[in-house]
Amino acid sequence: MDWEFDLLHWFQTLHGPLMDKIALGLTMFCEKGIGWIILILLVFLFAKDKRIGLTGMGAFCFSYLLCNMILKHMVARDRPCWIEPSVPLLVDIPDDFSFPSGHTSFSFASATAIFQYSRGWGMLAFLLAALIGLSRLYLFVHFPTDVLVGAFTGIVSGLLAGLLVKDFYKKYPDFKIPVLQRRGD
């Protein structure tokens, strides 16, 4: 765990007004998953291919279940800001456990869902997900291994959701969501 604190302390040397605003913006986008939920809902409502939205919703649900409902409580790891309360924080002290990072997991779950249908948008989503994960280190609220495992759980969640949606559409290729179909579809 020494190397993790060494890396977190290195991130503390990068603080400045612009970097602080960027890190706060990134982490707030993903607060309680709201930014990704809104993005997935917009994709679901406006994309012609509803599978991307369904996959995103499934990925987010799997990520939340695996990360926030199971692993955080099983591992019950203290956050770095709980262990070293002398480090000034730019965010409120989180009250849930540290491992794995929910922000990172939701982000990589969403990025994986998008990537399965659009490589270009998916790469941009992965870049955003990685920056969100790094923001959690910069803000001193997660350990590096929290972020790495969060990314892994997110990718697994996104792949699982993708497999389920693709399997569903293989069985029911003509399935449409009537209320959400665009004219002419």
Image (cartoon, grey):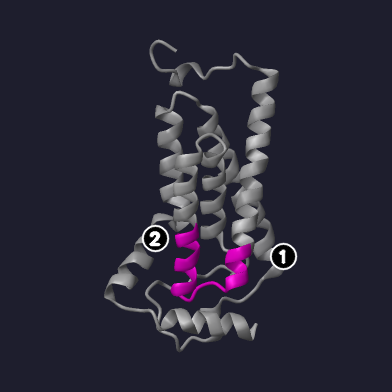
The x and y percentages for residue 110 are: 52, 46
Q: Residue furthest top?
A: 184
Tag 2: amino acid? Leu
Q: Which residues are magenta?
A: 130-148
Badge 2 marks a residue whose secondary structure is: helix
Residue drawn at x 33%, y 71% is 19
Quadrant where the C terminus sits is top left
Compared across the picture, whether 87 is left or right of 79 comes to left
Residue topped by disc 2? 26
* Residue 27 seen in render: yes
- For the residues labelled 1 and 2, say whether their Cβ atoms are less than 8 Å apart: no
Look at the image and tell me in which quarter the N terminus lies: bottom right
Q: Which mark is residue 74?
A: 1
Asked if residue 134 lies in the magenta stretch, the reply is yes
Q: Amino acid at mark 1?
A: Met
Q: Is residue 153 magenta?
A: no
